[in-house]
Image: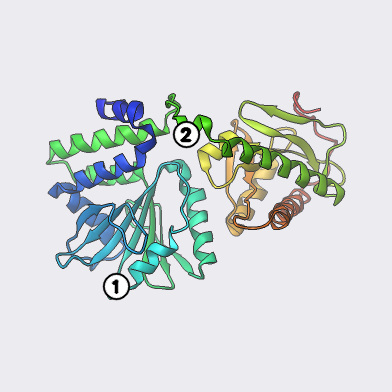
């Protein structure tokens, strides 16, 4: 349900949503009951945490976590990073963990984000830790968290959703109706951010030429990847056309020399928005892609290789094509081709059958 608070933020401050949510959460944590609830959640990760007080937007060495949690001696114990749909910055999470590493007591980096981002954000955090030479080991997640990791440089890393955090804190506020009402205001804002409601455009958005340039670069990349995959015998596109609608741009193809598994590959805006991580996806449509047969093969493979998968249009199953960031084009193309080879190997586990019927908008 929309509230006055969420309406005003969405109407007038839509591009400041994360900052507003951070300030609202800090205000909530200034209340004793809410602060005790947050401390209970954090002590599920590090039981020996002292009492902490929360402040916002402090910085050190050009790093500015959303919230700092300090003890009475002003020593940091916890950083909280609040996310809606913005991507991770260069400093997240490695630089934040390096600051916490300097402390002589246990520390935590807690990341809060929408429920729909949990899978891809966890993978992105692990990827960036690996690039920074930090080993993350998953451990059992305490109540109120989605996942929790120990790191090779000592600080812990934890991830939770706004929904899970609010549900946890709400249990601690049974005797404080004022704090409960404030929590509902923030919950309504986070729900509104996830809605499909129209967000006003900014002048910067409509005049930013980098956005169309990026999309055009992606379309060129997809075309090159498909051409190379066809040349290498990974994909077969005979008698199939490109396909695009308002939610995606790409084309249909087949995996396998006997064309027994059909796929769609390209830029999927809806999945990109919902899951983040990458704009490129491979979709196995229900009949054409034999999704009911592919799903039990893809799910264990995706869990083992830490690749994001999602359901699309009900029965269709989609697999993320991760892009190598900060790399030259050749490396990016090689990474996608390698992922397509892996998917082709999974598809090859199915017994051949008569060529599946292509979607009506395919050939």
Pick out the residue farthest to the bottom: 104
Residue at position x 72%, y 44% from top? 221
Would you place residue 266 above or below residue 122 in this image? Answer: above
Task: Residue under label 2, please give it.
Answer: 204
Answer few, some or many: residues within 10 Å of disc 2's Cα (few below 14, many 20 plus, some between 14 and 19).
Answer: few
**Is residue 282 something one can see in this rendering?**
no
Q: State the image coordinates of residue 165 (x, y, percent, origin top left).
A: 31, 46
In the depicted view, which residue is nearer to us: 75 or 363? 75
Q: How many marks?
A: 2
Check contact, mark 1 vs mark 2: CB within 8 A. no
**Side (left or right) of 363 relative to 38:** right
Would you place residue 49 above or below residue 67 in this image? Answer: below
Residue 69: image quadrant is: bottom left
In the depicted view, which residue is nearer to us: 72 or 89? 89
Task: Residue under label 1, please give it.
Answer: 103
Mark 1 and mark 2 lie on one chain; the one further toward the N terminus is 1
**Is residue 323 something one can see in this rendering?**
yes
Residue at position x 57%, y 37% from top? 211
């Amino acid at each position: 349900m929309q509230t006055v608070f969420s309406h005003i933020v969405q109407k007038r401050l839509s591009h400041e949503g994360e900052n507003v949510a951070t300030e609202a959460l800090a205000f909530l944590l200034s209340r004793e009951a809410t602060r005790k609830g947050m401390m209970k959640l954090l002590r599920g990760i590090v039981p020996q945490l002292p009492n902490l007080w929360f402040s916002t937007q402090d910085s050190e060495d050009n790093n500015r976590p959303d919230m700092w949690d300090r003890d009475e001696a002003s020593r940091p114990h916890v950083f909280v990073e609040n996310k809606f749909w913005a991507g991770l910055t260069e400093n997240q999470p490695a630089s934040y963990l390096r600051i916490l590493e300097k402390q002589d007591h246990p520390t935590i980096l807690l990341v809060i984000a929408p429920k729909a981002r949990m899978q891809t954000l966890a993978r992105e955090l692990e990827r960036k830790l690996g690039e920074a030479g930090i080993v993350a080991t998953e451990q059992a997640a305490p109540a109120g968290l989605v996942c929790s990791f120990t790191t090779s440089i000592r600080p812990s890393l934890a991830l939770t959703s706004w929904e899970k955090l609010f549900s946890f804190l709400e249990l601690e506020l049974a005797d404080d109706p004022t704090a409960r009402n404030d929590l509902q205001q923030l919950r309504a804002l986070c729900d509104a951010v996830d809605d499909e409601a129209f967000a006003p455009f900014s002048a910067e958005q409509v005049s930013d030429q980098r956005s169309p340039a990026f999309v055009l670069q992606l379309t060129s990349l997809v075309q090159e990847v498909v051409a190379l995959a066809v040349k290498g015998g990974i994909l077969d596109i005979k008698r199939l056309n490109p396909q695009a609608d308002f939610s995606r741009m790409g084309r249909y193809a087949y995996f396998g020399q006997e064309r027994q598994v059909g796929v769609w590959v390209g830029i999927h805006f809806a999945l990109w928005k919902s899951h983040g991580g990458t704009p490129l996806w491979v979709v196995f449509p229900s009949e054409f892609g034999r999704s009911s047969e592919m799903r039990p093969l893809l799910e264990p493979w995706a869990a083992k290789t830490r690749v994001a998968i999602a359901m699309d249009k009900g029965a269709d199953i989609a697999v993320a094509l991760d892009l190598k960031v900060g790399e030259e084009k050749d490396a990016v193309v090689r990474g996608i081709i390698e992922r397509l080879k892996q998917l082709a190997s999974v598809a090859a586990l199915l017994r051949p059958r008569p060529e599946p019927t292509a979607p009506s908008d395919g050939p």
